[in-house]
Amino acid sequence: MDNKIYGLLAEFDTPTQLVEAARKVRDAGYKKTDAFSPFPLHEIDEALGIKRSILPFLVLGGGIIGLLTGLGLQYFVHVYDYPIIVGGRPFFSLPSFIPPSYELTILLAAFTAVLGMLALNGLPQPYHPVFNVPRFALASREKFFLLIETKDAKFDYDETRNFMQNLNAQEVFDVEE
């Protein structure tokens, strides 16, 4: 039975109930959890114990690589490959190198942000097992859901189901793969 089950999904009526339940789930030691809400809940990341993303550091790295690539390319072209004195400026004229380097910095930082966000979020993901629960359609309108996956080391079907029913959930569903 557990082989066909992806996890257990609890339904709540209010965001406060969801956040309180998420805190209890985290305090109970569950790690493979997720929450679904019709609007962003700023408290839910802390309640589930979700760590901050490394995306800002990836974007910074992409921007630095863009800056160094822009400066390096211009330096190579204007100093080594095709040195021409223009307007009496030296071969390496930093003020004239700033605009293209800036643009390449922004370009690579933006690409890193988009691709990093997609990769870290596991997107695109057109199908998720929670879509098999008929009431999950209400997650985009009025209901709040909390999921505990079977991959969690602490997951035991009967124990976890009883625990989730004690969280004042309106209903607890089996999520089939």
Image (tube, rainbow, N blue to C red):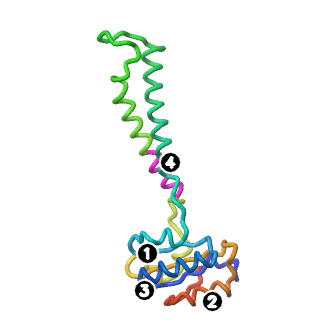
Residue 6 image-quadrant placement: bottom right
- Residue drawn where x is 59% and y is 77% of the image: 27
Disc nearest the viewer among 3 and 4 = 4
* Quadrant in the picture for the C terminus: bottom right
Q: Position of residue 163 (x, y in %)?
A: 61, 86
How far apart marks 1 and 2 lie (CA) works out to 23 Å
Of 38 and 166, nearer the camera is: 166
User: Going 53% across and 77% down the picture, which residue do you hit?
Assistant: 23
Residue 156 horizontal side relative to residue 103, left or right:
right
Kind of residue sitting beneath label 1: Ser
Q: Which residue bears the numbered disc 1?
A: 37
Residue type indicated by callout 3: Asp
Q: Earlier in the sequence, mark 3 or mark 4?
A: 3
Say above or below: 74 vs 107: above
Looking at marks 1 and 4 on the same chain, the residue that comes earlier in the sequence is marked by: 1
**Spatial distance from mark 2 to mark 4, Cα to Cα?**
41 Å
Q: Nearer the viewer, residue 5 or 150?
A: 150
Q: Amino acid at mark 4?
A: Phe
Q: Which mark is residue 57?
A: 4
* Cα gap from disc 3 to disc 4, whole angstroms: 37 Å
From the image, tell me which residue sits under label 3.
13
Q: Which badge, 2 or 3, is on the more N-terminal residue? A: 3
Q: Quadrant of residue 89?
A: top left
* In the image: residue 14, left or right of residue 120: left
Stretch of the chain drawn in magenta: 111-120
Is residue 99 shown above or below 49?
above
Tell me: residue 37, above or below residue 86. below
Question: Which type of secondary structure does the marked residue at label 3 adopt?
Answer: loop
